[in-house]
Image (spheres, coloured by chain):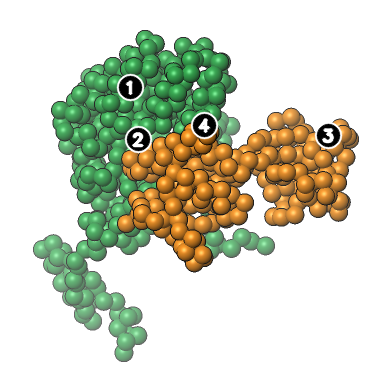
Amino acid sequence: MSEPLSNIPRGMRYYFGAEARIRRVVEDTAMSVFDGWSYEEMTTPSVDYYALFEQGMGRRQAERAFRFTDTDGRLLALRPDVTSSLARAAATLFAERERPLRLCYAAPVFRQKPQSHAEWRRESRQIGCELIGAANTEADMEMLAIAVEVLQRLGFGQNSYCITLNDVEVFNGVAEGLALDDSSRDQMRLLIDSRDAADLQRFLAPYAAPDEREGFARLIQLSGKRETLAEARRLITNPRSVAALHRLEELWRIIEALSLTDYFEIDFGDVSGLDYYTGLTFKMYLSGAGARVGGGGRYDQLTSNFGRPEPAVGFVFDLDALTDVLARSKNSTPAREPERTVVPIRNDDSTAIFFEAIGKRARGERLLIESCEVKQCRN
Amino acid sequence: MPELTIAVAKGRLQDAALARLACAGVIVSEAALASRRLAVADETGLFKFIFVKPADVPVYVEHGIADCGVVGRDVLLESAADLLQPLDLKIGRCRIVVASPHAKTVMNNFGMLRVATKYPRLAAEHFGARGLPIEIIELSGSVELAPALGLSDCIVDVVETGRTLAENNLSIVEVICESTGRLVVNRASYQLKAKSVANLIDALSESMSQEAKA
């Protein structure tokens, strides 16, 4: 007995109509912004060695990929992310190119196992950019400025989106100071990630004084602006974390000067991707989307996997998540049905009809050929 | 326009959850509750409440349909939902346990345990961590009947007073975890409605610490 072909595999879907138009507009908008900041588009292989992604994303993330074997038995994967491949290209193909490298992409990624119930898709389209070979705050700010421009050009204004900022070294410094082993470090990370202040305080009991514990637990619960940084400065004194706080402060100073503080929050509770990022991390949230619509950060060890260590920072937007929000909001520009009136052309002479059609197209007009079969039906 | 939508687990936890919220100044009127509507507003109109089955609370919150939820930790662990859990509300305290009619011998006497439960994920994790092979028999209610009827060797279930266990000749083999009602928050709402969420958390923890002092 054969499977019914009407079934679509879990996590896969079609796009058409308004949604397909929105996807086109969003992608074109983002890519033109990237182009405006001099980012060069790159297409990476859809299928690559699994080992590449294991190196690039870490084993836990890479294991979510669809995997299969090549004719020589080597393990292949359907691209679960684009960054790994770009990092390899930067270290090999573009080894001799002048730095910094500015690269961008729009490509589908495939993940067999979803991360949360809300992210049910197994194919999603990532739009992103990478700035490779620059370590300074200006490079971090360039990423944030690009992300803001993309969102604004898509029609998102104040109170409709929020970008959260953190630096993984804040957590790493604290964990190092407590001399945690790997499993307790992971436990602390999970407690912070779920903002479980009570359990975090219990966890910290053997390590820190009560007022410090309370302060730290509160810190990971509240996202905020400059005052959150000041509070963190007061509570956290180890040099590794302090250096990270200093970097965040420097970045915040620029954000303030640009009058962009309404769109940003400092969020010390964001500790996902610790084994991947090495400095700044940020996440994009949109009103109307239950999960984040994008994120990024600094990963200075990524290209060293391919023999050429250099600083790098990048981010991605999830095109499908953006589309979901835009498709549901009635007043969004891309969702509107374009005004397209087209008078069907008809002609029984099959040569004449194409003379007319090609002539119209040469003048840039839209046309629709009324097919003969339809006419017959009507008759 | 309500600022926050809160999903509350119907049943065991509902009254305690509403009492906690009332102490924190979020009051749902008797009339609104008596109406049996599935979505009601509080007296200020700032909060909208939806009452759903416990297992559906994490679903509504994870998808962002509800910004916050009140649900037991047992349900959260079983759902493995990706949610923030900023506050333990210390209501509806219970334990998830392994129980059996032959509590002393059950862990040693079987090459393969048959476990009846409403918590298949928790049960699999618990026994899996110890390398015990089990067959999970998933039930949706009256789990305590399963051993007596010969469906399973033991059960994994939630226990409040232990009376139901005793009535069915079951005793506790081991405790898997403690559970209390939690405030859960959607990840995006936590950022986009930061002020409202922070105010709610503050009001709740304030009223709880006052209660602890009294």
Asked whether the viewer can see residue A318, the reply is: no
- Tell me which residue sits at (88%, 40%) in the image: B102
Q: Nearer the viewer, residue B97 or A167?
A: B97
Chain letter belonging to callout 4: B
Is label 1 or label 4 in front?
4
Chain letter belonging to callout 2: A
Residue B199: x and y in percent read 37, 40
Circle 4: residue type: Lys
Say which residue label 3 marks.
Answer: B107
* Badge 2 and badge 1 in a common chain: yes
Chain A's shade in the image?
green
Chain B's shade in the image?
orange
Circle 2: residue type: Lys
Say which residue label 2 marks.
Answer: A283
Chain letter belonging to callout 3: B
**Numbered circle sitting on residue B213:** 4
In the rendered view, does A153 fall on the left or right side of A113?
A: left
Q: Nearer the viewer, residue A61 or B212?
A: B212
Marks 1/3: CA–CA distance: 51 Å
User: Furthest residue to the top?
Assistant: A239
Circle 3: residue type: Met
**Numbered circle sitting on residue A231:** 1
- Tell me which residue sits at (83%, 34%) in the image: B107
The quadrant in which the C terminus of chain A is found is bottom left
Residue density around tag 3, few if under 14, some if 14–19, many if 20 or more, within 10 Å: some
- Tell me which residue sits at (19%, 72%) in the image: A342
Callout 4: helix, strand or loop?
Answer: helix
User: Furthest residue to the left?
Assistant: A363
Residue density around tag 4, few if under 14, some if 14–19, many if 20 or more, within 10 Å: few
